[in-house]
Amino acid sequence: ARRKTIQLFSLLLERNGQVMTTDELCELLWEHKTDLIYKNRQYLYALTNDLGNALKEHNASAVFIKTAEGYTLDMSQIEKE
């Protein structure tokens, strides 16, 4: 699951602060496997929890934001090189 969690973080990072919906994330993470929509949504929920916990371990939980529309990252909290 860790690899998918990293992939989730990367997708959100690429969006540079724009909100991604659950549907968008599921399509990108599981490459249009629409026959598994419910299962993928459940898996995405687990991944978002994993990501939140991983960031919390590094005192960075404020970076990851869940909104009514979906998920995003607070880019002002991320150091850019």
Image (cartoon, rainbow, N blue to C red):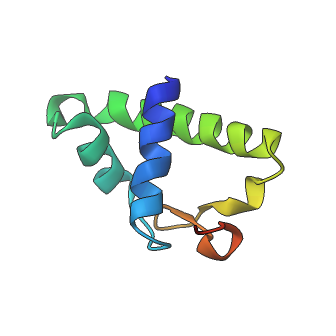
Q: Residue at x 50, y 48 (%)?
A: 9
Question: Is residue 21 left or right of 80 when viewed as pictured?
Answer: left
Q: Is residue 10 above or below residue 47?
A: below
Q: Residue at x 66, y 76 (%)?
A: 76
Q: Is residue 76 above or below residue 55?
A: below
**Residue 72 picture location, percent across and down:** 52, 64
Q: Is residue 36 above or below residue 55?
A: above
Q: Quadrant of the C terminus?
A: bottom right
Viewer-nearest residue: 8 or 70: 8
Q: Is residue 36 above or below residue 60?
A: above
Q: Residue most toward the front?
A: 81
Viewer-nearest residue: 24 or 4: 4
Q: Residue at x 49, y 23 (%)?
A: 1
**Residue 2 picture location, percent across and down:** 53, 26
Kindly indicate the quadrant of the structure image that contains residue 49: top right
Q: Residue most toward the top?
A: 1
Kindly indicate the quadrant of the structure image that contains residue 60: bottom right
**Residue 36 picture location, percent across and down:** 24, 28
Q: Residue at x 66, y 67 (%)?
A: 79
Viewer-nearest residue: 66 or 18: 18
The tally of labels here is 0
Question: Is residue 65 left or right of 1 when viewed as pictured?
Answer: right
